[in-house]
Amino acid sequence: MTDLVLYIVRHAEPAYPRDALTARGRRQARTLARRFAREALTDLCSSPLRRAMQTAGYVARATGLPCALEPWTAELESWALAAGTPEEAPAWQVHPPAVRGARPPIDGDNWHRLPVWGDLELAERFAKIGRESDAFFARLGWVREGDRYRAEPPAAPRRVAVVCHAGFALTWLAHLLAVPPPLLWAGFALAPAAVTEVELRRGADGTTTPRCLALGVPIEGGGAAGRRAS
């Protein structure tokens, strides 16, 4: 039995100057709402940015759930390379070959030392997301113990949707799966309204590790359109 299903949802298509949804984005949000009305959600959360809150609002109305704001799930807008660098982009949008072709290859110990990151202090920023994530899971009844999560009674089965952003979602998933973030940044893209599904299924000893069941499944056709936006 799956004890916790976490849906990490990128907001629907945005009109960035207004931090709002486009007409297509509103259609995507309605489709998301219909999907989650069938999923028996128990919890709904959102980034405090408007494009995420508007997307979550459709789900809230369809499910009757209140939407809790989680400020720590806002897009990682300060994770930006310095102006004048070759990329001039957020860290998670660095040209993938610069990551995949790094020498020595990126691993769990050196990933934040790639020269292109400059002095962004990515290890410290990533660790902060990890702490916020662990506190979030603790509120859901799952306490982090080393590399595992332990279900604390009465951790009833839950289905939780978190509406957030492309860069944040991939970075959070890197924490949950213990994968160096740049490997997810370079290897995957999240379309607007894409849904990533993670499960926690406790073992006989009451512990588990997160497992990704689906990554970035778009709510409609069109693949990774808008993949370089946040």
Image (tube, rainbow, N blue to C red):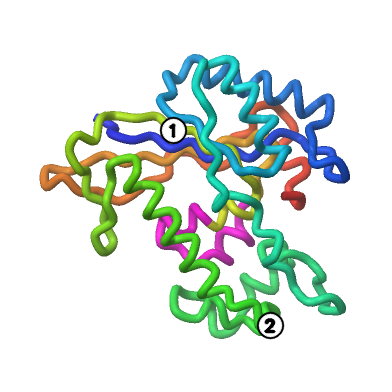
Residue type indicated by callout 2: Gly
Q: Quadrant of residue 192?
A: top right
Which residue is nearer to you in this view: 38 or 135?
Answer: 135
Please state the horizontal and vertical placement of residue 72, each as a whole percent of the image: 55, 53
Q: 137 above or below 1?
A: below
Circle 2 crowding by C-alpha within 10 Å: few under 14, some 14–19, many from 20: some
Query: Can residue 184 be seen in this snapshot?
Result: yes
Magenta residues? 172-188
Q: Distance between the Cα atoms at labels 1 and 2?
A: 36 Å
How many circles with numbers are drawn on the protein?
Answer: 2
Q: Tag 2 or tag 1, which sits nearer the N-term?
A: 2
Q: Is residue 177 left or right of residue 226?
A: left
Q: Is residue 109 left or right of residue 226?
A: left
What kind of secondary structure does the magenta stretch mostly adopt? helix
Q: Is residue 122 magenta?
A: no
**Which residue does the numbered mark 1 point to in the structure image?**
160
The kind of secondary structure element at disc 1 is strand
